[in-house]
Image: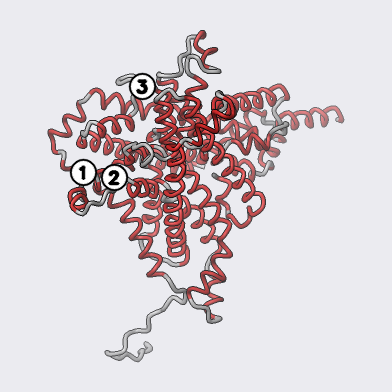
Amino acid sequence: MLAERRAAATHTDSALREPAWLRWTLIALVVLAMLGLIVLPLAVVMVEALAQGFLGYLKAIGDAETLAAIKLTLLVAAIAVPLNALFGIAAAWSITKYEFWGKRVLLALIDLPFAVSPVVAGLVFVLLFGAHGWFGPWLAERDVQVIFATPGIVLATVFITFPFVARELIPLMQAQGRDEEEAAVSLGANGWTLFWRVTLPNIRWALLYGVLLCNARAMGEFGAVSVVSGHIRGLTNTLPLQVEILHNEFNFAAAFAVASLLTLLALLTLVLKLWLEARHGDALGARAHRH
Amino acid sequence: MAVVLPQSANEPAPRWRDPLPGFGLTLGWTLTWLGLIVLLPLAALVIRAADLGWEGWAAILTSTRVQRALWLSFSSALLAACIATLIGGLMAWVLVRYQFPGRRLLDAMVDLPFALPTAVAGIALTALYSGNGWLGQHLEPLGITVAQTPIGIVLALVFIGLPFAVRTVQPLLETATRELEEAAATLGASRWTIIRRVVLPPLLPAMLTGFSLAFARGVGEYGSVIFIAGNIPFVSEIAPLLIVIKLEEYDYAGATGVATLMLLLSFIMLLLISLLQKRLSYAR
C-alpha cells in the first residue's frame, strides 16, 4: 500500500519535470544559441571598434563626416519621433474612447508599415517625390528637394516607425476605459484640462515606452533611409549609413567604432525598457512584455 | 393601445451627444496622417505598378534574376521563421520553467535584435561568421560556409526573428497554471505525453503569431542581410536588394514591379497564416 503510493508519487514527479540531464542540456542549448546570435556579435562590435586603440577609436568618432552623421541622425529622430507620438496619442484616443464604423480596418492599417519592407518604404517616397516621381517636376520647379535630402529621410523614418507609439497606447487605453474622463467632464473639465490632468498622467509611462522603442528604430533605421538618402557624405548620411560606407571601404575599425555608438544606444534603450517594465509594469498594460 | 410620441416637423429627434470632446479632432488627425504617410505612398506604388502594362509585367515576371531573388527572400524567411520559432519556443520554456545562473541577463538580452540597428547586426554577424571571423574560421574546415551563401541570410533572419518568437510565447507560459499538468500526471500520463498533449496545444496560436511576425519582418529585411549575404546575383541576392539595385540603375519600372510582387506575396502569406491560426484556435 505504502510502496504503491510512493510509486505513484514518483511517477507524478517525473511526469511534472524533465529529468536533470535534459534540463541542463536544454539550458546549454539556449545559452549556446544566445552566445552565437547575440552575445558574440555584441562582443565583436566592441573588440573591433577598439582594434586600433582608444585613440584610433576617438579619431574615428571625431571624424567630421561621422559628427555630421550623428547630427543628422539626432535631427531626424527629433522630428520623426514627436510626430509619431502625437499621431499615436490621437489614434489611441479616437480608437479607444469612441465607437465607430471601420475601427478594425483602421487598426490593421496602422500596423501596415510593419508588413512592408523598409526598402519598399523608401521606394514609395522616391516614386512620389523623386526626379521621376509624381511630384518630382513640381518640386524641382520650386527648388525643393525631398529625395536625397533631409525631408525624404524624415518621411521614410516616419513611415517605418509609424505604429510604435499607437501600438503601446491602444491596448492600455482600451483597458482603462473612459470612466475617469467622463467623470472629469461632468465636473466641468474642458478638453485641454482633461488631457493634461487626467489622460496624460494615466498613459505617460506607456507613452514613454512607445517613444523609447520608436526612437531606437528611428535612429537605427537603415533600409528605408538608404533608399532615399543618396549617401551624400557629410550631408545625407545617418549613422547606420555611415557604418555601411566605412565598411564598404574596408575601413573596418572606423565602421565598428561608429557601430559601437549605435550599439550603446541599443543597450541604453534595453536598460531603460527593463527599468520601465520593472518599475512601472502596471502602468504599461498587458502588452508591455511582448516587446 | 400604442403610445403616440409627440412629434414635430421642425424639431429634430434629440441626438445623443458624446460628453467626451475631441472625437473629430483626433480621428481627423489620425486619418489625415495615416493617409499622407502610409496610404498615399502605397497607393502611388500600386498605381505605378498598374502603369507597367502587360509587357512591363511580362518582362519582370519572366526575369530569372527576379524569380531567384523572390524565391530566395521568401524561402529563407520561411526557414528562418521556422528555426526562430523552434529556438524561441525552447528559449521561452527554459527562461520560464528553469532556474539557472544568468537567467535574468539572458532574458533581458533576448530583446537586443529589436533595439540593435540592422546595419550593426549585419556587420557584426559578418565579422563573426565570415571565413576569417571568430566562428567562421572554425566552421569553414567543417565545410560550412556561412558568409556569401543562403546560410548567412537565414542566420541573419533568425537573429532578427528570435525576439518575436520568444516574446509571443513567454507571457503565456508565465501565466499558465500547472494544474492541468498535475491532473494529467495523476492520471498517469508521461512527461512527453503531457508536453505534447497538455502544454503545447494552447501555445500553438501564440507560436504561430510569433512565426508570422518573424516571417513578415524577415521577408523585407535588408540591413542585417546584405553584409553577410555577399549579394551574388542568382545565389545570394535577396529581393529588397534587387529593388535597391534597380533603383540605382534608374530602372523605376523594375523596382516598382519587384516591390509590388513582394507586397502581394507577403500579404498572401500573412493571410494564409492568420487563417491557419483561426482554425487552430477553433480546433481547441
The amino acid type found where label 3 is placed reads Ser
Mark 3 to mark 1: distance in Å? 31 Å
Quadrant (top left/top right/bottom left/bottom right) for the N terminus of chain B: bottom left
At horizontal 53% and vertical 37% (from top left) the residue drawn is A261
* Left or right for B251, reference A210: left
**Above-or-below relation of B266 to B238:** below
Toward the viewer: B20 or B129? B129
At horizontal 62% and vertical 34% (from top left) the residue drawn is B93
Give the residue number, with chain letter if any, for mark 3: B236
Of the numbered discs in the image, which one, if any, rests on residue A147?
2
Q: Give a yes or no on whether discs 3 and 1 share a subunit.
A: no
Q: Quadrant of residue A226?
A: top left
How dense is the environment of label 2, judged by Cα within 10 Å: few (below 14), some, or many (20 and up)? many
Residue A96: percent from the left, percent from the top? Answer: 47, 63
Mark 3 residue element: loop
Residue A199: percent from the left, percent from the top? Answer: 54, 67
Toward the viewer: A42 or B18? A42
- Which is more foreground, mark 3 or mark 1? 1
The amino acid type found where label 1 is placed reads Ala
Decide: marks 1, 2 in contact (CB < 8 A)? yes
Asked if residue A37 shows in the view, the reply is no
Toward the viewer: B48 or A230? A230
The amino acid type found where label 2 is placed reads Ile
Of the numbered discs in the image, which one, if any, rests on residue A131?
1
**Above-or-below relation of B6 to A24:** below
At horizontal 29% and vertical 29% (from top left) the residue drawn is B242
